[in-house]
Image (cartoon, rainbow, N blue to C red):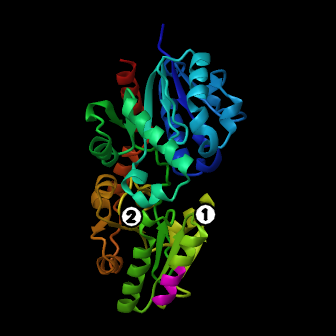
Amino acid sequence: MPKRLLLDIGPIAGGHGARGIGSYVRGLIQAVEEWPAERQQQVWALTVPGVTPGLFEGRTVQPRLLGLRPVDLGWILGSSVMGRAARTAGADLVHSTDPHRPARLPAVRQVVTAYDLIPLLEPGVLNSWQPHHRHAYRLYLEQLRRADVVIAISRATVADLVERLGIPESRTSIVYPVIRAPLVAGRTPVPEPTFLYVGALDAHKQPGLAIGALAEFRRAHAGGSLRLVGPSTSEQRTRLRRQVESLGLSGNVSFEGRVSDEKLDEAFATATALLVTSRIEGFGLPGVEAVLRGLPVVAVDTAAARETLGSAAVLVPPDAGAIAEAMASPQPVPDSVRNAMASRFSSRAAADALWAAYERAFG
């Protein structure tokens, strides 16, 4: 009898649904769609009530409790909900994709996805959380340590798993995100140099460094603006606006918050270059999306940037002056680079890597 897998696709709904974890899990679904039909039949989906992708019609488990906000009660109910769902599906293997819903499942083999270890590597992040959120994260780290196979989204994440959690590299597999950004033949940048930052305004992403780089650029070129696109807290915006005012950049920096896919496409299409200023990332989605759209990228040189962008971006030290210098001469993205990147982060590539990981986990 073929072995059966239960895949948690719950993150495609709710707060993570738009980008981030939800985007990654949608990529897993696209990868499964690439498999032969008989292989697809081995996969059941664990999902919230009312969300059933057609691929899993007749093969879903939809516990009512899965609809509760994971950050509030998911860590308490995770083991119970996931264990019961595995029994309902008759699963030999469970793939857990939501770090907010850690589960101990002694009766079945388990694959767990690791996106990054930023809360562990950035103490300020973990310390800012409520005590029960910190406890849930520690349970998730233990889940990673116990997993039969850990699927990481990059080699950079694998290195952190080995170094910080002591997980043997032999128990890890890399399944890159599926990125379906349009391969654009031409762009229409606005006349004045306009630089783009895409991502949350979190400290580890260093949006202040992008603002500082714009100030350096304007000193040398008497022009230029910066669009900050992504979610933020009022405290983050207040702090960064103070920096903008102190540098005399009022009117040259816009805080645009979350935007629709259409607005994001417009921002990519009209920008002069994307600035990637993170000091640490598990992957770095905006940089790859920019390259696929033909938008030049200036990125701080990190392990994740070297792995995902490499020569497709200009990699610089985490210094405002160095970033500003690169902003002055953005490097065009050759079609050959875009095509190679599209293949590397395609659903076909993810399909092969995902099945290889599952085969290892089945044992």
Magenta: predominant secondary structure element?
helix
Q: Position of residue 361 (x, y in %)?
A: 38, 23
Residue at 40% over, 19% down: 362
Q: Are marks 1 and 2 in contact (CB under 8 Å)?
A: no
Q: Position of residue 248 (x, y in %)?
A: 48, 91
Which residue in the rendered view is the most extreme toward the front? 131
Q: Amino acid at mark 1?
A: Arg
Query: Magenta segment: does it hold 242?
Result: yes
42 versus 78 height, above or below: above
Query: Magenta segment: does it hold 227?
Result: no
Residue at 48% over, 44% down: 137
Residue at 47% over, 14% down: 3
- Neighbour class for label 1 at 10 Å: few (<14), some, many (≥20)? some
Q: Residue 258: give its label.
A: 1
- Neighbour class for label 2 at 10 Å: few (<14), some, many (≥20)? many
Q: Position of residue 52 (x, y in %)?
A: 67, 32
Residue at 43% over, 29% down: 111
Q: Which residues are magenta?
A: 241-247
Q: Amino acid at mark 2?
A: Ser
Q: Residue 278: give its label.
A: 2
* Distance between mark 1 and mark 2 Cα atoms: 18 Å
